[in-house]
Structures are given as structure tokens and as C-alpha cells.
Image (cartoon, rainbow, N blue to C red):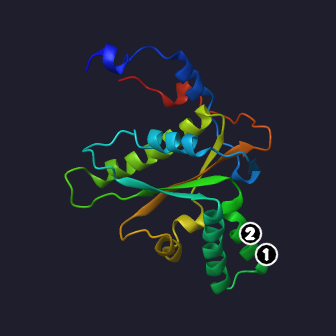
Amino acid sequence: MSQEKDGPFNLPAPAALSLLLSRRSGSAKAMGEPGPSKKQLDAILQAGGRTPDHGKLFPWRFIVFQGKGRARAGEILAEIMEAEGERSKQVEEERERFLRAPVVIGVISSAREMHKIPVWEQELSAGAVCQNILVAAHAQGFVGNWLTEWYAYHPVVKDRLGLKPGERVAGFIYIGTSTAKLEERPRPEMDKIVSYF
């Protein structure tokens, strides 16, 4: 491929580095409208799909919750809580859970067992998808929050959301506009976590 036809590759991109160094999560409880438009959401999902993927297996997929789909997901959580005898306050909190943000992206890890690419590498790829989604949302001026919480692991939730045997939730990525000031959090001291061999 020529650079003239397809554009330059591997050129310095200091703005991209600044973007990465400024990314931070915002609480799903402090998100509101607007959320990403269809075009913005498509770009976010495409960025998620450009993650490193040993073997080109695409060992992940997406479930997008927006509009009424968020309420339907909340009904599933509320039904489960009710069936398990939870207090009515907790049931109502679960009913509202997916309504905290305008869009929620479920990243589903679908690692293949008994394949030459180790399952661990496939699962790491799903984690990288989550990070790409967060960075892409940040690049478009939104805030994101990568959560799992109890419903990511509950077998009935997984079944009702259509997960196949062996699939796992890598994360639910909440995306919206922050309704609260984002404050910087402590970061690791690099000299304590970096060594040179």
C-alpha cells in the first residue's frame, strides 16, 4: 500500500498521546445526555474492534443497550432480584441500573477453547477492546465507566442476554456526558512499577 493512496502510517501523533494521558473514568451514576450519536457510536465500536487479536479470531462481540433496551435489561435484573427475595429498594435500583447512562456497551468475551491461541490471550484481547472503547468515547468528548458488578456473572442474566456457553462479560461500558466535575485520581508512581532488564 502506498502512503499516497491510503494515507501516512506511523507518523508522530502527540495529540493522541495527550488524549491517552488525559483519559479517566467517570461514575456511571453521574452520567446524563447527550450520549453518542449513531455515527459516533459506530466509530466507538469500530475502534473497539481494532484491538490486538492474535490469530484474527475476533474472540469478542458487542451488545449495545440504548433507548428502551436499557429499560428491558433493567427489568431482567429486577426480576432476578425479586425472585431472590431482595428488598423492594434494591429491586428498584436494579431496574434503573442500565438507565444511568445514555448508552451501555456489553463487551462479551467469546474465547475459543482447544485452539492454538491460548484462551488467556483471547481474554486479554477482550480487555483491550474495553480500553479502546473507553479511549474512543473520550476522544469524542464523552465519559466512560467500565463496570462488571454482580450481573456480569449471574447465570440467569447471562442466559437472558443471550450469552452462549463459555461466553463471559468482559465489561459493561457506560458512556455519556458527565454531570459532575471529573477529579483526577491517584496514579502509580512509575519508578515503583517499572524495571529494566
**Residue 123 location in percent, x, y?**
38, 52
Contact check, label 2 and label 1, Cβ < 8 Å: yes
Instruction: Give the residue drawn at x 43%, y 68%.
Output: 163
Crowd rating for badge 2 (residues with CA inside 10 Å; few <14, some 14–19, many 20+): some
Please provide percent x and percent y for residue 73: 60, 69
Position of the N terminus, as image quadrant, is top left
Q: Residue furthest left?
A: 116
Is 100 rendered above or below residue 22? Answer: below
Q: Position of residue 180 (x, y in %)?
A: 80, 42
Amino acid type at circle 2 is: Glu
- The answer to whether residue 7 is above or below residue 121 is above
The label shown at residue 4 is: none
**Which residue is under mark 1?**
89
Whether 62 is drawn above or below 19: the answer is below
Q: Amino acid at mark 1?
A: Lys
Residue shown at the point (65%, 74%) measured from the top left: 75
- In this picture, residue 46 sits left or right of residue 35: left
**Helix, strand or loop at mark 1:** helix
Residue 162 x, y percent position in the rendering: 45, 70
Classify residue 195 by image quadrant. Answer: top left
- Per the rendering, the mark at residue 93 is 2
Q: Is residue 112 above or below residue 2?
A: below
- Closer to us: 79 or 63: 63
Left or right relative to 144: residue 32: right
Label 2 sits on a secondary structure element that is helix
Residue placed at 72% from the left, 33% from the top? 184
How many angstroms separate mark 2 from mark 1 (CA)?
A: 6 Å
Residue under the point 72% across and 43% down: 177
Q: Are there few (<14), some (14-19), or many (20+) residues within 10 Å of tag 1?
A: few
Nearer the observer, 68 or 185: 68
